Image (cartoon, helix red, strand yellow):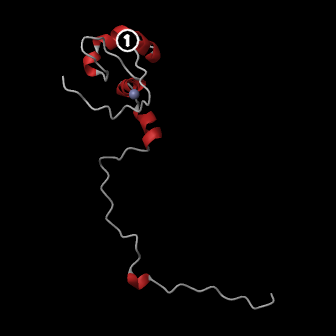
Amino acid sequence: MTAWTRRHCLCVEVRNLDYDEAAAALKIKADWLRDHIGQLPHQKFGRNAAVFCMCDLRLIQAMQTVMPPEAAELVDGPAPKPADTPEPATSAVPAYAALRPSQGRRREPAGV
Ligand SMILES: [Zn+2]
C-alpha cells in the first residue's frame, strides 16, 4: 500500500473517528465500512484499525451519492447534447467596417 496525499483533507485539528463513530456520522452500519475499506479513503496506522476524518467521510459520501440526471441538471445546468454541432466560431469583436465613432455627450446649454 502506498501512502497517498491528503489533499482532500481540510482538517486543522486531528479529530479522527473509528469505525463505529464514522458509521454513526454517516448513519450506516459499521460493517459496510469494514467490508469496503479497500475502496474507501481512510487512514491506517500499522496494525491499528482504520480511522477516518470528516474529510474522508465527505469523500465517501460523494463516492456514494446517487444523482439522477434531473437533479444533476439542477446542479450543473443542462448537459450538452451529443447531437449538437458546435456553433461556428464567431468573434465577439465587431468587424472594423461596422465600427462607428462613439457619440460624445451633448452639452446641455448652460443655465438649464
Ligand atoms: Zn480531514
Position in image of residue 29 (x %, y %): 40, 9
Question: On the rendered structure, is 25 left or right of 85?
Answer: right
Query: Which residue occupies 34% across, 11% down?
Result: 32
Query: Which residue occupies 40% across, 73% down?
Result: 93
**Quadrant assignment for ligand 1:** top left
Q: Which residue corresponds to mark 1?
A: 19
Position in image of residue 71 (x %, y %): 45, 34
Instruction: Give the farthest residue toward the right.
Output: 111
Q: Nearer the viewer, residue 112 or 66?
A: 112
**In which quarter of the view is residue 87 placed?**
bottom left
Whether 33 is drawn above or below 64: the answer is above
Query: Which residue occupies 75% across, 91% down?
Result: 109
The 10 Å Cα crowd at callout 1, few under 14, some 14 to 19, many 20 or more, is: some
Amino acid type at mark 1: Tyr
Q: Secondary structure at mark 1?
A: helix
Q: Does residue 66 appear in this view? A: no
Query: Which residue occupies 39% across, 83% down?
Result: 96
Question: On the rendered structure, is 111 left or right of 89?
Answer: right
Task: Give the quarter of the figure containing the C terminus.
Answer: bottom right
**In which quarter of the view is residue 11 placed?**
top left
